[in-house]
Amino acid sequence: MQDTQGTPEVRVFRLNGRPHAALVADHVLLLDYLREQAGLTGTKRGCDGGECGACTVLIDGRPRLACLTRAQECAGHDVETIEGIGAPGRMSALQRAFHERLGTQCGYCTPGMVMAAEALLRRDPDPDEAAIRAALGGNLCRCTGYVKIIEAVHDAVGTPR
Amino acid sequence: METLPPFRVATPATIAEAVAAAQESRAARFIAGGTDLMVNLRHGIGAPDVLIDLRGIVDLHGVWTDLAGTTVGAAVTLAELAGDAALAARYPAVAEAAAAVGAPAHREAGTVGGNLCLDTRCVFYNRSAWWREANGFCLKHQGSVCHVAPTGTRCHAAFSGDLAPALLVHDATVEIAGPQGLRRQALDALYAEDGAAHLRLAPGEFLTRVILPADSARSAYAKARARAAIDFPLAGVAVALRAEAGRVAALRVAITGTNARPLLLAGTEALLGAAVDVDAAWLERLGKLVQKQVQPMRTTLLAAQYRRRVAAALAQRLAATLAGAASQAHAA
Ligand SMILES: Cc1cc2nc3c(=O)[nH]c(=O)nc-3n(C[C@H](O)[C@H](O)[C@H](O)COP(=O)(O)OP(=O)(O)OC[C@H]3O[C@@H](n4cnc5c(N)ncnc54)[C@H](O)[C@@H]3O)c2cc1C
Ligand code: SF4
Ligand code: FES
Ligand code: FES
């Protein structure tokens, strides 16, 4: 059993809508896999683990922290990162609202914020302010003071995504 | 860059496979959502060679109810629990406590078993490896002195899971699997008042289910925390109260965040029989019971005395609200 520690294995999952085969060892965090191996650096590392939400991705449509998740446990699941939202030159309604409402300043928290808000809007297309605040409760922002972010999510409500 | 030291993950599909996997290595650890254990591993606390992921075991999933009560699988997530309307109607405190854990992403991953078996917490312990090393480690792990009570011989790190008190006031039983087979015991007997060894589980044992007996008491949960959006409880209190013929017929109070174990308040029998529109003197007696039994130490950034008082205040507030509702129901 011990001798297999650290040996990469092929894990197959969906990544941003496409089948994806990852050659990855069991102990590698999804965050590290995405950033270092898959080249998807949109997902951010903002803390020592679990505290800031900058690494929020969607697994099977639900918000999850890539910094506490292993790539191995994604096998058979559907993983979405900020790179899967919108397309170059074509922002999603949520991204456009963040842009237009100044919901993003330095931008470090933004991918996590957008993913957490995206998860909310898929589950509840018409959230009130309390629901928006609750959905973003695990996402820290050191720039905006949150008000602009909440306004941005509000703006995106009801616009087709 | 690799954040964690190498380990292998075992993914048993049955309880028997999980028990067998645990016997293959002394350094194996069980894991579910990983929202507690992965943080500790990142902090250099523990170096398992194998993590046994319990979530692939079908028997650990599902919430089902019959006349005798409700059974909750240990791998049920907190998000599932918080969203279960039938459970919320029967055991309000349990659903409220599940919804009060961390933030949405923690509740999507975090499980009932992981929450009940959460490691204890302390400002000197939940730190990076270099921070703890620079501070000479501590009694709980790798060191010899407790920085909270340096003359003492035991760890006072606080049990800070939200679910345990809510399950305790509903008299929960846990089912435990291990090399000896399955056994059941009161949830209360799972814990010991020792911050460095607060779980009474033998090596290789894990929780499979929580069983809640049918209960006509109404219940509620409330917690005090530094940030309302996301935080462990500085003190969390669950109260269950049942009224009969306008009198308090049953009262159970349980507290988290103040002791090394979740605490089921003793001596509440003395408060039974009072008219259910409880008066200030009754609430005062309840508050005193709480203040006497909780033992908060300087394990959080807020003062221990604050946590003692807030625990009492929350117990009084919840009991007054539940008693008020029962009193109105009686009058109607
Ligand atoms: C920023 C942050 C905030 C948090 N806030 C809160 C909070 O407010 N309230 C709160 O209660 N928790 C909080 N948590 C802790 C955690 O998210 C939850 O307690 C969660 O329920 C833990 O469950 P898990 O499945 O992720 O546990 P894991 O991390 O998988 O496991 C935790 C421990 O339990 C053991 N274990 C897991 N399942 C079993 C089982 N079936 N039988 C025996 N042992 C088992 C593991 O070996 C490990 O020691 C927070 C965490 C973070 C990072
Ligand atoms: S209470 Fe003492 S021994 Fe326990 S974790 Fe804190 S400093 Fe360490
Ligand atoms: S990097 Fe994942 S929560 Fe901070
Ligand atoms: S925009 Fe800078 S952290 Fe949020």
Image (spheres, coloured by chain):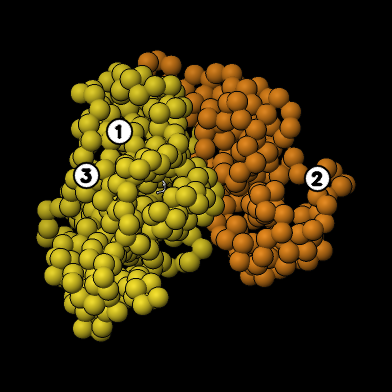
Chain colours: A orange, B yellow
Amino acid on which the number 3 mark rests in the picture: Ala
Residue A49 in sight from this viewpoint = no
Residue at x 66% of width, y 49% of height: A123
Amino acid on which the number 1 mark rests in the picture: Phe
In the image: residue A157, left or right of residue B224: right
Q: Secondary structure at mark 3?
A: strand
Whether pointer 2 and pointer 3 mark residues with C-beta atoms closer than 8 Å, the reply is no
Tell me the residue that label 1 is attached to.
B206
Tell me the residue that label 2 is attached to.
A86
Above-or-below relation of B301 to B41: below
The mark that comes first in sequence, 1 or 3, is 3
Specify the quarter for ligand 1. Answer: top left
Tell me the residue that label 3 is attached to.
B186
Above-or-below relation of A149 to B6: below
Q: Secondary structure at mark 1?
A: strand
Q: Position of residue B154 (x, y in %)?
A: 15, 53
